[in-house]
């Protein structure tokens, strides 16, 4: 029997990375020697002190709760580590009720709309942008209005360009800086404008800050929570995945507006059981020694960024070195301007290299493609060599 799928699933396009994995499998089945630069999953190991803390916590015979539900017996040290990190990193003081720990930020982003949106409500998401913003809206029965991120505006949200009727109806606006997929950065003045926009239109601002610690050349990404009054109109999603090489661990948090945090916590109480206590202890260790961990991880990505950008620019591209994230966002060659999908497909077919077509991140991602730096240096070097040797 073929089970019919729900109407909400029918509203979703194929998930971008599931589709990439399928194309990779098909190419390999044809005997193609595939090199994937498509998915942002760090190849470096999680730092040893974090792993050691996980092993200690999961093996501790003095902790009878070590294998129990993480929601029933949470680790208060993790939330306190979040509060301490925000104080050290941003000078921001958070209260206990302003912090909720989550199973990674993707889960939280998908769950959050269920906490604050009703069926038929309007929410705003960037294009190009992380597909899970819209996915969360669809699962909540809400509708997405896409605000374009344009190269002419440095891929920043133009609040003044959002139509008045959208501002009147919308309840939620997602922003994401440093940005995936464009690697764009925003200064504190941008976040002030975001807070002002949210206050003026009674719209909650949700800032996805997953890449705030992957920064280079002396750049430090700000937090929206640094803006006075932000905790009235904003929440921020912070993830340990990319900054600490902990993608599979699923450790993150959401901070900010206390009523929104309470609502998300209520959703979580009903749909998940929290993360393993040992992971929470390990995440605590990570945050408490963050300043010691970031430099070595970011040095690797900065070296890879330079290698990729220099090689592509030497072969006709014009790419600025991104100051943050683990990606390089580049325009497709002129002959492919109308279709990043065609460029990515031909690149896979002719060279075996997988990149992410910009169209996969939304209408306004068309004309670009994304390279992930989460692959070993020799793999990146070979892949970029194949790309530059292809007749484009």
Image (tube, rainbow, N blue to C red):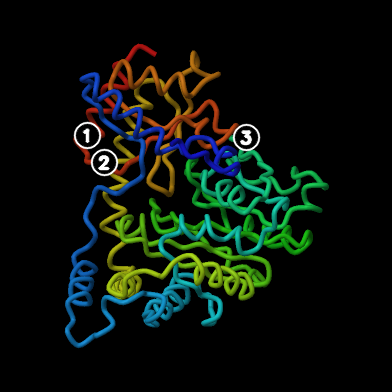
For the point 66% across and 41% down, the residue is 146
| Labels 2 and 1 touching (C-beta < 8 A) | yes
Q: Position of residue 228 (x, y in %)?
A: 65, 72
Residue placed under numbered mark 2 in the picture:
375
For the point 72% across and 50% down, the residue is 122
- Dot 2 or dot 3: first in sequence order is 3
Vertical side of 305 occupied by 350: above or below: above
In this rendering, position of residue 310 left or right of residue 359 = left
Image-quadrant location for residue 31: top left
Q: Position of residue 341 (x, y in %)?
A: 47, 23
Dot 2 falls on a residue whose secondary structure is loop
Dot 1: within a 10 Å radius of its alpha carbon, few (fewer than 14), some, or many (20 or more) residues?
Answer: some
**Mark 2 and mark 1: Cα distance apart in space:** 6 Å
Vertical side of 41 occupied by 78: above or below: below
- Which residue is nearer to you in this view: 94 or 292? 94
- Which residue is nearer to you in this view: 84 or 240? 240
Q: Of tags 2 and 3, which is closer to the observer?
A: 2
Residue placed under numbered mark 3 in the picture:
152
* Residue at far front of view: 1
Residue placed under numbered mark 1 in the picture:
379
In this rendering, position of residue 106 left or right of residue 112 = left
Dot 1 falls on a residue whose secondary structure is helix
Vertical side of 300 occupied by 200: above or below: below
In this rendering, position of residue 221 left or right of residue 288 = right
Dot 2: within a 10 Å radius of its alpha carbon, few (fewer than 14), some, or many (20 or more) residues?
Answer: many
């Amino acid at each position: 029997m073929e089970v019919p799928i729900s109407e909400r699933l029918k509203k979703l396009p194929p998930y971008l990375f599931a589709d990439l994995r399928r194309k990779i499998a098909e190419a390999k089945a044809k005997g193609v020697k595939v090199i994937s630069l498509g998915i942002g999953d760090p190849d470096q190991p999680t730092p040893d002190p974090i792993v050691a803390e996980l092993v200690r916590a999961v093996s501790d015979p003095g902790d009878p709760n070590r294998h129990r539900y993480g929601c029933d017996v949470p680790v208060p040290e993790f939330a306190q580590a979040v509060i301490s990190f925000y104080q050290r990193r941003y000078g921001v003081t958070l209260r206990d009720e302003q912090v909720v720990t989550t199973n990674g930020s993707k889960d939280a982003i998908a769950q959050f709309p269920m906490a604050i949106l009703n069926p038929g409500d309007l929410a705003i998401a960037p294009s190009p942008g992380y597909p899970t913003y819209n996915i969360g809206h669809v699962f909540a029965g809400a509708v997405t209005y896409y605000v374009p991120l344009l190269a002419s505006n440095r891929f920043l949200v133009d609040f003044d360009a959002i139509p008045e009727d959208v501002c009147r109806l919308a309840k939620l606006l997602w922003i994401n800086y440093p940005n995936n997929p464009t690697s764009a950065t925003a200064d504190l003045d941008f976040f002030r404008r975001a807070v002002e926009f949210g206050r003026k239109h009674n719209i909650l601002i949700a800032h996805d800050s997953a890449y705030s610690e992957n920064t280079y050349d002396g750049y430090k990404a700000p937090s929206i929570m640094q803006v006075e009054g932000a905790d009235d109109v904003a929440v921020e999603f912070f993830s340990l995945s990319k900054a600490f090489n902990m993608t599979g661990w699923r450790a993150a948090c959401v901070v900010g507006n206390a009523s929104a945090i309470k609502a998300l916590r209520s959703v979580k109480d009903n749909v998940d059981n929290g993360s393993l206590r040992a992971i929470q202890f390990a995440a605590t260790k990570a945050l408490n020694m963050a300043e010691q961990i970031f430099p070595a991880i970011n040095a690797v990505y900065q070296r890879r960024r330079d290698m990729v950008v220099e090689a592509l620019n030497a072969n006709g591209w014009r790419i600025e070195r991104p100051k943050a994230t683990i990606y390089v966002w580049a325009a497709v060659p002129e002959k492919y301007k109308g279709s990043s999908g065609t460029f990515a497909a031909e690149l896979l077919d002719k060279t075996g290299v997988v990149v992410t077509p910009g169209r996969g991140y939304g209408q306004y991602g068309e004309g670009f493609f994304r390279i992930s730096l989460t692959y070993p240096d020799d793999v990146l070097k070979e892949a970029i060599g194949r790309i530059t040797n292809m007749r484009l």
